[in-house]
Image (cartoon, grey):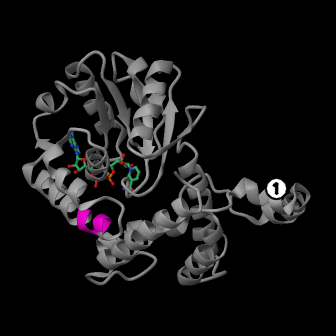
Amino acid sequence: MGHGIAQLFAQAGFQVTLNDVSLKILDRAVSRIQDSLPRLVNHGIISPEDADEVPGRITTTTDLDEAVLNTDYIIEAVVEDLEAKSNLLGMVDEKCPAHAIITSTTSTYCVRDMAGALKRPERFLVTHFWNPPYLIPIVEVMPGDATSPEVVETTYKLLEAVGKNPAMVNKDVPGFVGNRLQHALRREAISIVAQGIASPEDVDLIAKLSFGLRLPVVGPLETVDLGGLDLTQAIQTYLLPDLDCSSEPLQLIQDKVAKGELGAKSGKGFYDWPPGRFEEVIRRRDETLIELVILLKKFGLIE
Ligand SMILES: NC(=O)c1ccc[n+]([C@@H]2O[C@H](COP(=O)([O-])OP(=O)(O)OC[C@H]3O[C@@H](n4cnc5c(N)ncnc54)[C@H](O)[C@@H]3O)[C@@H](O)[C@H]2O)c1
């Protein structure tokens, strides 16, 4: 996420400093940015001249002091581990200028769970980007109780300046909006497979080629309105008692994790992942996303 967010801001003309724990990781981050630029140029997302400017706007350093000393806006994107995030956020808060805004692109944690590490919680909030950040338009903005309104306003303006659509999350809740929705769907998908109702391949096919195909155009609540709230009520009266409502990861996931079946990174998850398949899926995802973003702009669905 870090290199994708750095790329997004550099594409919009900002000077960015990318910080990580080793030079090797930072070099890989820069080469990933360099690899993705020609694809964006080929599809007309950015001009060749603008793409040429991007690498020159990104500085890398393993030195946290150097990274945050003269910065106005900091986006934390380290591993999804509350302790790691809190430790780093506390250090960043100590070292950065008093006016700087500090955000986290955590996928799930509440602001209140991280803000305790900062002396200035009023300058802190969550900005949840989606992967890849330079393509997915939305960023969920979730302030905490202590976040100052000025910090929220500046964040909105900045996100709009880099071409994103910020969306407000009014309450400080785990998973914000996107991941609450996504994990409700994922829990049911896993449950369907666990019960033998359908194979992983067919679950994914049905999701992708039914409501998944409509989602960029008609959201879940618009769909309720289109079909009628009485229809949703009738369906939910019959269906909801049969849906999974587990409050912990399903046994199937726990078993697979215990067996080391972690997905693409271990070679097996719900699917087999022979060498090269991961790269191929990501390439296809990004190529399709680029065309989809162009199409959504053409039809006025995003700016
Ligand atoms: N991958 C996604 O699809 C996605 C989407 C939205 C949000 N997020 C969130 O973004 C964050 C990063 O996710 P990711 O997938 O890029 O993870 P990642 O593991 O690929 O990258 C995390 C990076 O943080 C670095 N790091 C760890 N400790 C550090 C420290 N103390 N100082 C500096 N760098 C440090 C690691 O070396 C690594 O390069 C997580 O909070 C994740 O939940 C991920």
- The image quarter containing residue 27 is bottom left
- Determine the main secondary structure of the stretch shown in magenta: helix
> Residue 257: x percent and y percent?
40, 66
Residue toward you, 120 or 116:
120
Q: Callout 1 environment at 10 Å: few (<14), some (14 to 19), or many (20+)?
A: few
> Residue 47: x percent and y percent?
28, 59
What residue is drawn where x is 25% and y is 46%?
Answer: 10
Judge whether residue 143 can be spotted in this image.
Answer: yes
Q: Is residue 258 above or below residue 274?
A: above
Kindly give the residue lying farthest to the left in the view shown.
Answer: 23
Question: Which residue range is magenta in the image?
Answer: 37-41
Residue toward you, 5 or 237:
5
- Is residue 95 part of the magenta span, yes or no? no
What residue is drawn where x is 24% and y is 67%?
Answer: 38
> Residue 80: x percent and y percent?
36, 46
- The image quarter containing residue 274 is bottom left
> Residue 74: x percent and y percent?
29, 32
Judge whether residue 263 can be spotted in this image.
Answer: no
Q: How many marks?
A: 1
Q: Is residue 54 left or right of residue 23?
A: right
Residue toward you, 248 or 71:
71
What residue is drawn where x is 76% and y is 60%?
Answer: 223
What residue is drawn where x is 40% and y is 57%?
Answer: 131
Which residue type does callout 1 highlight?
A: Asp
Disc 1 target residue: 225
- The image quarter containing residue 235 is bottom right
Label 1 residue SS: helix
Is the distance from the Cβ of mark 1 to the nearest ligand 1 atom less than 8 Å? Answer: no
- Is residue 38 part of the magenta span, yes or no? yes
